Amino acid sequence: MTPVEVRTEILPSGPYRLPGPLPDGTLRRRGDVLVRLLRVDGHDVLLRAARARDGRVTLGARLLGDDAGAGARDPRRAASEALRRWRFALAVDQDLRPFLAAHRDDPLIGPSLRAHPWRRPHRRPSVFEAVLCAVCEQLIAYEDAVAITRRIAHRHGASTRWAPAGGGDPLALTAPPDAATVAGRTAPAHLEACGLAPSRAAALHRAARELASGRIDEAGDPDRVLLRLGRIPGIGSWTLALVAAQGLGRVDRPPSGDLNLRKALGRIRTGDPRARVPEDDVDAWLAPYAPWGALAAAHLMARRPDTLPVTVPTAA
């Protein structure tokens, strides 16, 4: 039986590069091909992307095997949905030219914009995956969050091995579980066993139930999605900002509570690398970059701390 596969080719508007591989193993690269695994509508789907010299990006989504899980839907529909999510996750339709034109000469983020005009917040292929990764990152070191995400994917998600057509050793691919899997077959205790604190495990499990049941419709109004997620205990403004950027493609909600941003502004204001400012100060600081606050934050956090300008307030 010929495997179900769908493809498309896009010429992005403005500067664009495919993202690099992720340390949590969800996104990997072999040569010029970016690849990941995704669970959609009960099917495991292999996603691939490659960028040609003329800038065109080719995307493909191929269903793996014929052993779809319980509740699996139409295979071609699943492949098409996977391709849509892949296209979103790679942000090939996002045009950064208005943002670049507005702030290319900005003294703070201009150097990063000129050197890396394609930089943008990384996206996830679903709101739930964005929630999962954001909850794992709450108040812990990034390396620890990555380790927890990897354990959740290995123990409760999907996995396969992909051998590229050109030969070479197969790549091991894993994908985090989707909302339906966590809501139906994973208890908070299973998430705790992967390293999540009990309160975060409960928040993630409740978000999965809300999304899997449709009480939160991730295809609906983004503001309503964020409002409903924000009612879940344990999901605060920082987590919502990451979900807005990574799961909904919003660039108008910067993660103002991010410690790196608070430290960056503290260093700029005082010259002290240990200084940090309140979240409200970060909001005010990024207000001139609206409606691209998350893009500005991404460029700012990409700068080395020792390259940030220092503006020490004049004593009264």
Image (cartoon, grey):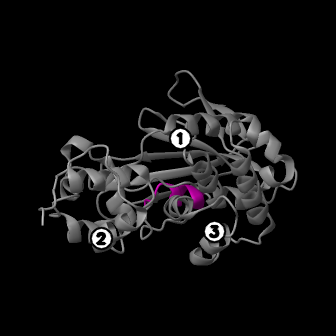
Q: Is residue 103 left or right of residue 28?
A: left
Q: Nearer the viewer, residue 54 or 175?
A: 175
Check disc 1 and report the residue beneath it.
Answer: 27
Q: Is residue 215 left or right of residue 296?
A: right
Q: Which mark is residue 230?
A: 3
In the image, residue 154 sits, relative to residue 137, either above or below, namely above
The question of residue 162 being in magenta is answered with no
Predominant SS of the magenta segment:
helix
Residue 255 coordinates in the image, percent (x, y): 45, 60
For the residues carrying marks 1 and 3, which lies nearer the camera in this image? Answer: 3
Splitting the image into 4 quarters, where does residue 229 fall?
Answer: bottom right
295 sits left or right of 206 in the view: left
Q: Magenta residues, as a range?
A: 83-92
- Whether residue 304 appears in this view of the structure is no
Pointer 2: what residue? 289
| Label 3 element class | helix
Element under disc 1: loop
User: Mark 2 to mark 3: distance in Å?
Assistant: 24 Å
The residue that appears at 79% across and 61% down in the rendered structure is: 209
Q: Residues within 10 Å of mark 2 (few under 14, many from 20)?
A: some
- CA separation in Å, label 1 and label 2: 30 Å
Q: Earlier in the sequence, mark 1 or mark 2?
A: 1
Disc 1 marks a residue whose amino acid type is: Leu
Locate the C terminus by quadrant: bottom left
Instruction: Identify the residue at the far top of this view.
Output: 169
Give how far across and how far down residue 102 sits, in percent.
22, 71
Q: Which mark is residue 78?
A: none
